[in-house]
Amino acid sequence: MRKRRVVILGAGGRDFHDFNVVFRDDPDTEVVAFTASQIPGIDHRIYPPSLAGSRYPEGIPIVPEDDLARIVRAHEVSEVVLAYSDLSHEEVMHKASRALALGADFRLLSPAVTSLRSRKPVIAVCAVRTGAGKSQTSRHVASLLQEAGLSVALVRHPMPYGDLEAMRCQRFATVADIDSAHPTIEEREEYEETVRRGIVVYAGVDYSEVLSRAEGEADVVLWDGGNNDVSFFTTDVHITVADALRPGHELRYHPGELNVLLADVVIVNKVNSADPADVRTVEKNVRQLNPTAAVMHAASPVLLDPGPDLDGARVLVVEDGPTLTHGGMAFGAGTVAARAAGAKLVDPRPFAVGSIRGVYERFASVGPVLPAMGYSETQVHDLEETIAAVDCDAVVCGTPFDLARLVHVSRPIRRARYEFRDVGEPTLAQLLGPAIDQWTHAAHEGPG
């Protein structure tokens, strides 16, 4: 019987994990290609033999998703597997229709099949959409665990955009560790603030090895589900962050809806800035989807670091890139902080150069702010040139990393960032308290 030939649709993250867990050692399946989307410059690579295993001595090609029809026909592919996130349900079904029209089955893998089981407790912080407030929630959960005397390893959803072999398993305990990995801006956004708070971060490509190392040094493993993906690990507590500024998205996005269905706790976030009617809509949808989940409210107040007075100043706002692009938001923390300080926003779009100009062309929803895009040295250079071209008095950086460490900026910079704050009861500490007490007791008892 001929092997079942498979193409995995991905974006440099879950696609590799699903392959490693489900397909790598399956003798009845041949994965002929990964496709790449969402992130620029991650195609035209090879998933290396050292990761692909003995059944793939030449590795597996990674090609643009636009090549799907050619790959399916050339290799007589019988199954297309979707393995990336932050897609509307409509987009998912467009991809399904395309695969079916080519004569291939279309498949989504269940978390029950792809999740690895840890010998340590696992808390997952996932979201309905990119930019919902997951990162500050993860940091808050880590602080609650640390205050209880538990050691924590935060495992971040993969961002393997560089040398896949070198990124097989990464551990970051200091900013110097991050620098030595030559990360993209997106990686810096996700790692730097967490590490500065004394939380060890793991990431990589082979999450069996990542999990083994993380649980070897921590009492609790904390999954941080970037790009609103589902946890790669079987969870003891599943937290899902919903965004009150985007009511209805909890019903319309994959795997955001799945995260609500899996949740033990759903946090309706940004209630401090959302319309109360939208907060009620999100809560109603969540309770209908998952009546057994505990539902709480949270705010995302913006903290602005000290610096020059911005009242009346002409300000360029630099925002988190993924939140504006595939997250679909028009603004972020920097915009909120700049407006609250009385600043006048300068529109950077007329000054954009190179790949940054291309970002604006591709993502028309982006407002008069500058996405902090930097997936390559060229793009970082384009970002620096765009900043230099904007006539402004100051820069407000709404990204969680230190912009001045990466690009030269001649004007003063003030950093803005979201923080987590409970609103009313139950609080997150109250909801997690019983589990934390149990884990603390077990950690103090020891293996005996």
Image (tube, rainbow, N blue to C red):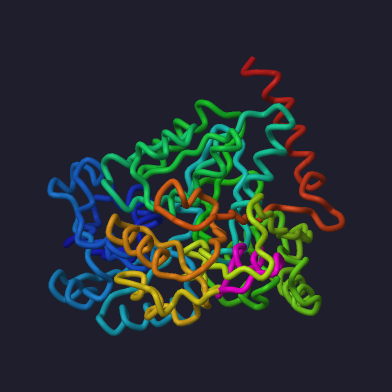
Tally of numbered discs: 0
Residue at 32% x, 59% y: name it. Answer: 381
Q: Is residue 119 left or right of residue 285?
A: left
Q: Is residue 28 left or right of residue 363?
A: left
Is residue 343 covered in magenta? Answer: yes
Nearest the eye: 328 or 264: 328
Nearest the eye: 299 or 378: 378
Is residue 250 covered in magenta? Answer: no
Nearest the eye: 234 or 218: 218
In the image, residue 428 above or below residue 35: above
In the image, residue 220 above or below residue 389: above
Q: Residue furthest right?
A: 424
Q: In this view, does 324 lie to the left or right of 299?
A: left
- In magenta, the rendered stretch is 330-345
The percent position of residue 325, horizontal first and vertical second, equals: 46, 71
Q: Is residue 232 visible?
A: no
